[in-house]
Image (cartoon, grey):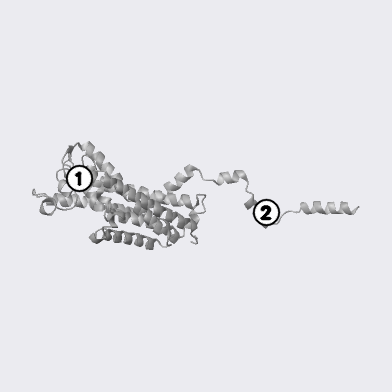
Amino acid sequence: MSRAEVNATEDVSTSVVPPTPGAARAAEAHVPDGPSVESRRPSPLWALGLFRSELVTVVRRWRTLALLGVLAAVPILIGIAVKIETRGGGTAGPSGGDGPAFISQVTNNGLFLVFAGLAATLPVFLPMAIGVVAGDSIAGEANSGTLRYLLVAPAGRTRLLLAKYASVLAFCLLATLVVAASALAVGALLFPLGEVTTISGTQISFADGLVRALAIAGLVALSLTGMAALGLFISTLTGSGVAAMAATVGLLITVQILDQIPQLHAIQPYLFPHYWLSFADLLRVPVYWDQLVKNLELQALYVAVFGSAAWARFTAKDITA
């Protein structure tokens, strides 16, 4: 056999030597099979299922149910207090109706209890509930050790973060509707219903008033979106759910205090709760849109800034738990 034939034989034998297991895994990682990649790519229905799973998880927690129970109880307590105070023909609120917003009108029309309930819960109870849920969204999973297993699914960090935020937004709407529904039920039970006298002094039908009440509930839910984005961002900064919830609620209280100090009027229009009570302008004829639009623009700004910050932090975060 010639030298050339020997070299050719050695080349053929070398080429058929099976690769080592490490080389085989590297080749599979760098040259994936087409159909398997497609099968691992999440479909829109799968993303919808992820959102549904997150929402169900949030709603089923005992803490969440307790928060909803407290929110539902506030209009009930207001309605009972007004009924007792006006039982002898008196007026609701001190000094002939100078109490909280819409309290003095509740006795004439039970629909106003919806507005009074939202006005009473919006400064503290509603945003506090949102802060607890948003603050626990990421940090709670990390604290319990389930965040790492959630990321094993083909959702990716961005889709998981969006599902978390969408579930918090859904809770914003749910919490607001719980307050409105509880107030409407108690108002119908304890007080008469009929035509609604707007802030402008004009009369609108009960159906029109009910539509406006629903619109106000939706506006209140939208007013909480900035708070939800802020809580989500704080939740990505720590692995402790309790710390994230405490920080979010503490920040809410601090901002509420700053919004009440007259000397800080220059920065108050940029604080997320500044225009929360502007929903009352929907009860004017015609509707005053200036502060309503400013409120929505401010919430959109907070969502854009802190939502982006949460995404940047979460996608770069080292998940070890």
Q: Which residue is mark 1?
A: 112
Residue 24, numbered circle: 2
Residue 193's image quarter? top left
Pick the front one: 191 or 288 = 288
- 97 sits to left or right of 173: left
At horizontal 33% and vertical 53% (from top left) the residue drawn is 65
- Residue under the point 38% across and 61% down: 244
Q: Amino acid at mark 1?
A: Phe
**Residue 180: x %, y % from top left:** 26, 46
- Measured as percent of width and height from the top left, residue 205 is found at 19, 36
* Residue 56 appears in view: no
Disc 2 crowd, CA 10 A, few/some/many (<14, 14-19, 20+): few
Q: Label 1, label 2: how many angstroms apart (C-alpha)?
A: 71 Å
Tell me where residue 310 appears, x and y as whole percent.
43, 55
- Type of amino acid at the residue the image marks with label 2: Ala
**Residue lying at 45% horizontally and 44% vertically, measured from the top left:** 48
Residue at position x 30%, y 48% from top? 294
Q: For residue 215, what is the image quadrant? A: top left
Q: Residue most toward the right?
A: 1
Q: Nearer the viewer, residue 231 or 70?
A: 231
Rate crowding at label 1 as few (under 14), some (14 to 19) or many (20 or more) other CA atoms within 10 Å: many
* Residue 159 point in image, percent of width and height: 47, 49
Q: 117 or 294: nearer the eye?
A: 294
Q: Mark 1: which secondary structure? A: helix
Report whether residue 127 is seen.
yes
Q: Viewed as shown, does residue 19 lie left or right of 81?
A: right
